[in-house]
Image (tube, rainbow, N blue to C red):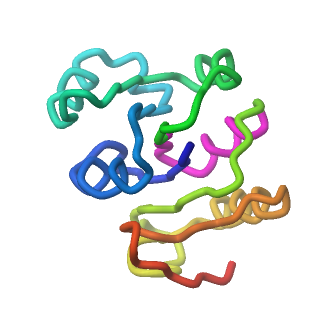
Amino acid sequence: MWVRIDNRLVHGQVIETWVPYVDAKTLIVVNDALAQDVLQQEIISLAVPEGLNLLFLSLEQLKKIHTKLQDEILILFANCQDARIAFENGLKFQVLNIGNVHYAEHKIQICEHVALSPEELQCLRYLRKQGVELDFRCVPHRHIQVEL
C-alpha cells in the first residue's frame, strides 16, 4: 500500500509513473467532496487505464473498510489533514509520499513541488512523530531532502 498527498489527485503523473512504480492494482481517491460527485468521478475515470480498479471514498467510507485493504493499492489524498484523519481513524501507513501541494498566500515553498501552510507543517510534524516517514517526491526516482 502506498499513500500519497497530491492536491491534483488523479492525473497523468500518477497514472504513468506512480501506479507502475508501486505496482498498484487499485487506486483509491479519498476525498469527501469527490466521493459525492458522480459527474467528476466519471470524468476522472476516463483517465484511468483498463485493468486498474478505481474507487472514490469519503473519509468515513475509508474508516469502515481500511482493515480490509490489501497490498497493491495506491491511496490518494488531496491534503495532509485528510491523511491525518485517516491515520487517526486506523489507516496505519509507514510512509507518506508528499507529491504536490500548490503554493498559495501564507504558504512556505519548501521544495519545487510543495508549499505548506503552518497548519500543514504541523500536520506533517504530527505524522512524523507518530513514526510515519515523510517522502517528498514528485516522481518515483527523484528523492528530495526536506527539513520541516
Q: Position of residue 5 (x, y in %)?
A: 50, 52
At 23% from the left edge and 32% from the top edge, which residue is drawn?
Answer: 44
| Side (left or right) of 11 relative to 19 | left
Residue 96 lies, with reference to residue 60, above or below; the image says below
Q: Position of residue 6 (x, y in %)?
A: 43, 53
Q: Is residue 147 magenta?
A: no
Numbered circles on residues, count: 0
Q: Position of residue 119 (x, y in %)?
A: 67, 59
At 19% from the left edge and 28% from the top edge, which residue is drawn?
Answer: 50
Q: Quadrant of the N terminus?
A: top right
Foreground: 132 or 141?
141
The answer to which image quadrant residue 84 occupies is top right
Residue 124 lies, with reference to residue 93, above or below; the image says below
| Side (left or right) of 107 relative to 119 | left
Q: Is the magenta region chiefly helix, strand or loop?
A: helix
The answer to which image quadrant residue 145 occupies is bottom right
Q: Is residue 80 magenta?
A: yes
Residue 112 lies, with reference to residue 55, above or below; the image says below
Q: Quadrant of the C terminus?
A: bottom right
Residue 59 lies, with reference to residue 96, above or below; the image says above
At 63% from the left edge and 60% from the top edge, which residue is drawn?
Answer: 120
Q: Position of residue 113 (x, y in %)?
A: 40, 72
Foreground: 44 or 51?
51
At 54% from the left edge and 59% from the top edge, which residue is drawn?
Answer: 97
Magenta highlight range? 75-88
